[in-house]
Amino acid sequence: MWSGDELDLDAYLARIGLGARPGAGPGSGPAGAAGERGAVRELRPDRATLYAVHRAHTAAIPFESLDVLLGRPVALEVKAIEDKLVHGRRGGYCYEQNSLLAAALERIGFEVSGRGARNRTRGESLLAVTHATLVVTVEGEPWLCDAGFGYQGPCEPVPLARPGTEVRQGPWTYAVHEEEDGVLVLRTRRGDAWRDLYAFSPQQYHPVDYVVLNHYSSTHPGSSFVGRTLVQLPGDAVRRTLVGRELTRLHPDGRTEREPVTSDRLLGVLDREFGLRLPERDAAELVRIHRSGD
């Protein structure tokens, strides 16, 4: 379903810092447990591998929708995503991130299915289903996997078999709660309060569904991605987001630090805070757009 057979798995693992050792990994067999960051034992479709790949992916590949800002189409074919996020060392937004993660997990041997979710981080507003997320089944148990929700998203899988189970991911806490109508809601805890991130139903989504959602998100004037800079990166000690001309750092205790980002600082911030370097032409165009709002 996710075209995992078309993915260069070795290149993907190298991109996320889980390069295989000689005689191990995808070149020596289909699956196995991932070891410490920077090395991979034989890959298997088990929980250890799922955790290692998910965490490494979210740490290495930033969330960004800069192609939308630049007015360029966002392609969702696996090879196009691989060229951009793996070989080009760019980031991407949910459709790209989770399509890439799904292809890698499928290639390793996991059972992967898609879901469509409603963002709930904007108060009481009822938003359309535009977020793409994944459910991965391991040893008969489903896990929510999401490398594409930006700086607020989980860095590791979240269990779905027992709704309400709290999981600690470093200093951050997540849980999936079930509502009366069977809708599942991913929540995160800030201090003593739980905050909804997004809600999703059991309905399975396919890659073709993400093509439709991607078209809306990348072109519709009402989309939150159109016409603004958006780059994010989750982390343990601090989570970073650049929205428009403001960089925000979110700490586990709820503290936030904000600073303006002018056009002359933009490329340095992208590199230093997000590990993101654009090709010269794209960088120049991005600075021009940014400068127009200074």
Image (tube, rainbow, N blue to C red):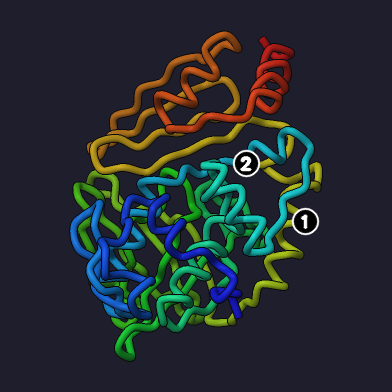
Residue bearing mark 2? 65
Q: What residue is at 70 percent from the left and 71 percent from the top?
A: 209
Q: What residue is at 36 percent from the left and 29 percent from the top?
A: 249
- Which amino acid, mark 2? Ser
Q: What residue is at 35 percent from the left and 77 percent from the top?
A: 160
Closer to the camera in the image, 25 or 158: 25
Marking on residue 215:
1
- Which amino acid, mark 1? His
Closer to the camera in the image, 275 or 192: 275
Q: Quadrant of the C terminus?
A: top right
- Residue 160 drawn above or below residue 7: below
Going from N to C along the chain, the mark reached first, 1 or 2, is 2
Q: What residue is at 77 percent from the left and 41 percent from the top?
A: 72
Q: Quick check: can you spot residue 166? A: no
Closer to the camera in the image, 34 or 154: 34
- Residue 18 drawn above or below residue 276: below
Identify the secondary structure beneath mark 2: loop
Q: Residues within 10 Å of mark 2 (few under 14, many from 20)?
A: many
Distance in Å between CA atoms under marks 1 and 2? 13 Å
> Percent position (x, y) of residue 248?
42, 27
> Percent position (x, y) of residue 243?
55, 30
Left or right: 65, with 75 as reference point: left
